[in-house]
Amino acid sequence: MNETVIQFDRHQHNTDEKCQERILNSKRNLKDSLIILGHHYQNESVYRHADYTGDSLKLAQYTQALDAKYIIFLGVHFMAEVSNILSRSDQVTILPDLSAGCQMADMADLQKVERSYRELNKVLNFDQTITPITYINSAADLKAFCGDHDGIVCTSTNAPKILEWAFKSKEKVLFFPDQNLGRWTGFKMGINLDEMVVWDPDLPLGGLTKEQITKAKILLWKGHCAVHQMFRLDHIKKFRSDHPDGIVISHPESPFEVCSNSDFVGSTEFILNTIKNSDSGTKWLVGTELNLVNRLANEMIKEDKMVKFMSHVICECSTMARIDPQHLAWVLENLENNNIVNEIIVPEAIAKSAKIALDRMMQVV
Ligand code: 13P
Ligand code: SF4
């Protein structure tokens, strides 16, 4: 490592324009040693620099396939952890701002998951009947827990296949941290709503009776995404009355009544592809994060498609937004000086178990 690490305060006050120039310059100098991956929720000011873009699954698959020494992740912390776990040991994953977390991921932690799993097994007389499934939006130690307990990881794209996989071997699932994705996926598989109960990790026995636990097929962790929680059935009703020929598409992190009243439900990549491949002149109401919707709306104008954001309040993912041109320029200029800043390294023991759960997922999809 070079001694002269450039400190962030040297970049913090640079204008976006100045940073754009610097980013392009550094990318030119770093050539093939660098790959920038960008999630669809990233702001245009950094998204435009991504070499590859995708939803969580596609980005995870890229990290297994790319050759570059440095992977800069324009996304949030759990995505960069997955990149570190799945990439080769000589590759380096960098998250330009370490405070870019995911509020939903923070709703489950290892201590609570371990205690919940223990309590559930006790009620079920240690029959080993529960598969733990963690949404990829979770810390690496929860993925490791799943790896160590015959569990698995899922994403918004593959959740149906992953649930099917789980029910082949055990009769129940503990699904964390997003209750909405778990409920919607279970419902689409034909599981009754009363067989999917919310497990509140802060209450004794999750706030449930022993009978409820015994009867349940899916125990849904009491977690959600605050961004998608803003979408409401009323938004859909208003859109349908204004545009009777309009089409509604939502992300499965949205509340159940939003998903069940949408024409399509799927991952960020699915939302983008569905609208891009639709007929000219179509009108869309989209229930997912604002940066993605704004970018798509601007692109689709030229094809005479109307793309409308579902909520009337601004639902931006504030943690995704922490990755800005200033931070990107800063990590790149340090790389040019042979300084690695903001590297994401998952401790080896955790990474090893987490990889088991991630590999299981990659084999199912
Ligand atoms: P996708 O995997 O669909 O991109 O979702 C990630 C996410 O965090 C949505 O809020
Ligand atoms: Fe997490 Fe929600 Fe942001 Fe997605 S939109 S990264 S789930 S806080």
Image (cartoon, rainbow, N blue to C red):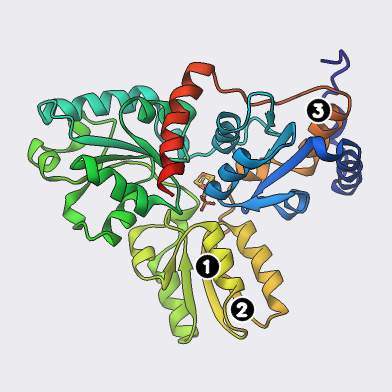
What residue is shown with label 1? Answer: 286
Residue at the spot of label 2: 306
Is disc 1 placed on a helix, strand or loop? strand
Which residue sits furthest left?
Answer: 211
Mark 3 surroundings: few (<14), some (14-19) or many (≥20) residues within 10 A: some
User: Which mark is first along the chain, 1 or 3?
Assistant: 3
Q: Looking at the picture, does residue 196 appear above or below residue 358?
A: below
> Is any atom of residue 297 visible in this view?
yes
Q: Residues within 10 Å of mark 2 (few under 14, many from 20)?
A: some
Amino acid type assigned to the residue bearing label 2 in the image = Met
| Residue at left offset 48%, top offset 28% | 140
Q: Secondary structure at mark 3?
A: loop
Q: Splitting the image into 4 quarters, where does residue 292 fall?
A: bottom right
Image vertical order of residue 268 relative to residue 318, above or below: below
Q: Residue at x 74, y 49 (%)?
A: 51
Q: Is residue 100 left or right of residue 239?
A: right
Q: Tag 3: residue type?
A: Phe
- Tell me the quarter of the picture where residue 274 sits: bottom right
- The quarter holding residue 356 reads top left
The location of residue 192, given as percent across then percent down, is 18, 58
Q: Dot 3 corresponds to which residue?
A: 8
Marks 3 and 2, how far apart at CA:
40 Å
Q: Is residue 32 left or right of residue 75?
A: right
Q: Which residue occupies the foreground of this view, 290 or 116? A: 116
Position of the N terminus, as image quadrant, is top right
Q: CA distance from mark 3 to mark 1?
A: 36 Å
User: Measured from the top left, where is residue 64 in percent x and y?
Assistant: 60, 38
